[in-house]
């Protein structure tokens, strides 16, 4: 318990907060890695996933590709890229992009695949072009699953971004590695708590976004049959007799 | 007028859905394609708006070969109503109805105003306009589907087993509504069903199909009932089991019509 209190004390200590080596800046780097990598991954994976989802072609390739990417150990990729690219932010960023691609790719094509084939067939039959089917039918209806993919990409990257410090890439991992090396465990623990909190907050935010993007008509509650006036003649009697009143 | 000229459709898996099919569908009438599953009726319907392209042969609409027309443009001038309505679940009823006019470039406000009138046409209350399809009953959704099919004021309305998934009472309502709409608006309706009673009720021209799009008989319901072309047709329409046979019994000096079970169904006018 003392260790955790020490960690919290480290977080609260103003000396550890500001300046280029403070945790405010490192947290910013952690977020920059996360959103930078997810943004780049999204630019690559969403069009690819949409293409696969709309045409149904290349699905096997996409599945095995994302499966294969998922199996890559991030630390190994990071070290390998670090050897080639040197220290700094580039190797970690590329590693995290590779990490974020599979869930986003899967979310994009699964979102399209989840749309009822009959709905798409009807859209085509009334005269939508393929582009209009994608934009007006598949994208809005597939959005919740895509956001789910992005959510899982963000969570994986935000946790893994601590590894960036391994090749002097900054971010909150810098404190963790430094703390271990100098046996300053309150520093290690403080930074770990920050990463955990960050991940929890992002999880909450994305859970909310995911809920908000579900099209209203899809969440709309099914109601019991309510007949319109014109579809059937009214009952001959007025309001039913209420007994015992 | 829609003409099929020796139309054949073979699917990539080798199934021949329709072979050397010829048919003339008269304008401003209802033609019903009826047959059991696998007779190619839906394939025939979907070839009219080029949802399926024939392997060989031609389909002409008012003398124009559809093969020469752009599919998307063609589909926008032909109404299409399918089973389970096929409405877009994320769009309100009103926007579903306005889909095709909006695609054709009609301003949204104008298209919505027209869509409201169409709700009246198909017998739906205007208060449903802002609901989503899922909030409607099956029968109501089907009416919205019909309204959408009519929105661009097409000459031709294709209906693919539109009432297959609704309960019998609602189906009877929708059938009457279809007859009323067809008569009122003078559309050329091509209707696909496997229900011979529905075919006889709605069709001015009924086309009875056998496997592979082979026409067993074409004619008005009365012609088919009076002279079934062969045993297949006779059994399909139920004539062989006496299902369609009515007899006259004299009761108190009047002619009472009774069915095969002896149940009276009406009285003959002198």
Image: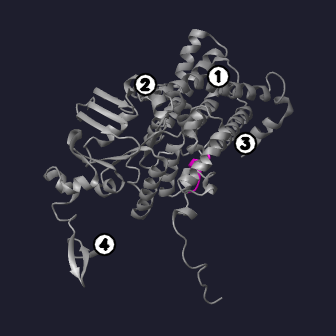
**Residue at which label 3 appears:** A4
Q: CA distance from mark 4 to mark 1?
A: 95 Å
Q: Nearer the viewer, mark 1 or mark 3?
A: 1
Do the residues indicated by labels 3 and 2 lie within the same chain of the protein?
no
Q: Nearer the viewer, mark 2 or mark 4?
A: 4
The chain ID associated with circle 1 is: A
Do the residues indicated by labels 1 and 3 lie within the same chain of the protein?
yes
Q: Nearer the viewer, residue B96 or B221?
A: B221
Residue A178 is at least partly visible in this image: no
Q: Residue A192 appears at what percent x and percent y?
A: 68, 35
User: Which SS class for mark 3?
Assistant: helix
**Residue at which label 1 appears:** A164
Residue A245 vertical placement versus B152 (above, below) = below
Q: Residue B27 appears at what percent x and percent y?
A: 39, 40
**Residue at which label 2 appears:** B69
What span is colored magenta in the figure?
A215-221
Q: Nearer the viewer, mark 3 or mark 4?
A: 4
Q: Which mark is residue B269?
A: 4
Q: Nearer the viewer, mark 1 or mark 2?
A: 2
Residue A199 vertical placement versus A105 (above, below) = below
Q: Could you tell me if the residues under marks 3 and 2 are in contact, i.e. CB atoms within 8 Å?
A: no
Give residue B16's quadrant in the image: top left
Q: Nearer the viewer, residue B6 or A111?
A: B6
Q: Which mark is residue A17?
A: none
Mark found first going from the N terminus, 2 or 4:
2
User: Which SS class for mark 2?
Assistant: loop
């Amino acid at each position: 318990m003392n260790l955790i209190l020490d960690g919290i004390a480290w977080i609260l200590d103003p000396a550890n907060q500001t300046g280029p080596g403070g945790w405010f800046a490192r947290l910013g780097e952690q977020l920059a890695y996360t959103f930078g990598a997810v943004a780049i991954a999204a630019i690559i994976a969403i069009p690819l996933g949409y293409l696969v989802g709309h045409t149904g072609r290349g699905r096997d390739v996409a599945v095995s590709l994302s499966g294969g990417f998922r199996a890559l150990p991030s630390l190994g990729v990071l070290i390998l890229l670090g050897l080639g690219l040197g220290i700094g932010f580039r190797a970690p960023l590329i590693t995290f992009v590779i990490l974020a691609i599979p869930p986003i790719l899967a979310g994009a094509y699964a979102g399209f695949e989840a749309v009822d084939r009959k709905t798409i067939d009807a859209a085509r039959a009334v005269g939508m072009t393929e582009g209009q089917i994608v934009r007006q039918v598949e994208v809005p209806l597939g959005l919740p699953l895509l956001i789910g993919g992005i959510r899982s990409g963000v969570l994986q990257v935000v946790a893994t971004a601590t590894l960036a410090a391994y090749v002097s890439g900054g971010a909150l991992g810098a404190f963790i590695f430094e703390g271990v090396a100098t046996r300053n465990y309150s520093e290690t623990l403080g930074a770990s708590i920050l990463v955990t909190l960050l991940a929890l907050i992002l999880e909450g935010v994305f859970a909310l976004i995911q809920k908000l993007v579900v099209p209203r008509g899809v969440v709309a509650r099914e109601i019991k049959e309510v007949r319109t006036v014109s579809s059937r003649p009214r009952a001959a009697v007025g309001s039913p007799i209420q007994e015992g009143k | 007028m829609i003409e099929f000229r020796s139309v054949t459709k073979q699917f990539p898996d080798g199934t021949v859905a329709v072979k050397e099919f010829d048919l003339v569908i008269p304008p401003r009438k209802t033609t019903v394609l009826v047959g059991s599953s696998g007779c190619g009726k839906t394939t025939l319907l979907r070839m009219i708006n080029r949802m399926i392209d024939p392997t060989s042969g031609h389909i002409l609409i008012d003398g124009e070969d559809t093969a020469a027309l752009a599919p998307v443009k063609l589909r926008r001038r032909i109404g299409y109503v399918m089973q389970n309505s096929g409405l877009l679940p994320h769009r309100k009823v009103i926007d579903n109805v306005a889909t095709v006019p909006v695609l054709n470039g009609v301003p949204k406000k104008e298209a919505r105003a027209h869509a409201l009138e169409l709700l009246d046409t198909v017998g739906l209350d205007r208060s449903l306009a802002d609901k989503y399809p899922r909030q409607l009953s099956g029968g109501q959704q089907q009416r919205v589907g019909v309204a959408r099919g009519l929105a661009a004021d097409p000459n031709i309305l294709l209906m693919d087993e539109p009432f297959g998934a609704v309960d019998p009472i609602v189906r009877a309502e929708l059938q009457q509504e279809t007859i009323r709409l067809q008569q009122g608006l003078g559309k050329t309706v091509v209707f696909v069903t496997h229900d011979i009673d529905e075919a006889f009720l709605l069709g001015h021209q009924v086309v009875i199909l056998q496997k592979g799009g082979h026409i067993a008989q074409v004619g008005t319901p009365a012609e088919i009932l009076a002279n079934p072309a062969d045993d297949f047709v006779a059994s399909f329409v139920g004539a062989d089991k006496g299902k369609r046979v009515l007899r006259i019994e004299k009761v108190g000096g009047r002619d009472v019509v009774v069915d095969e079970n002896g149940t009276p169904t009406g009285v003959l006018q002198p």
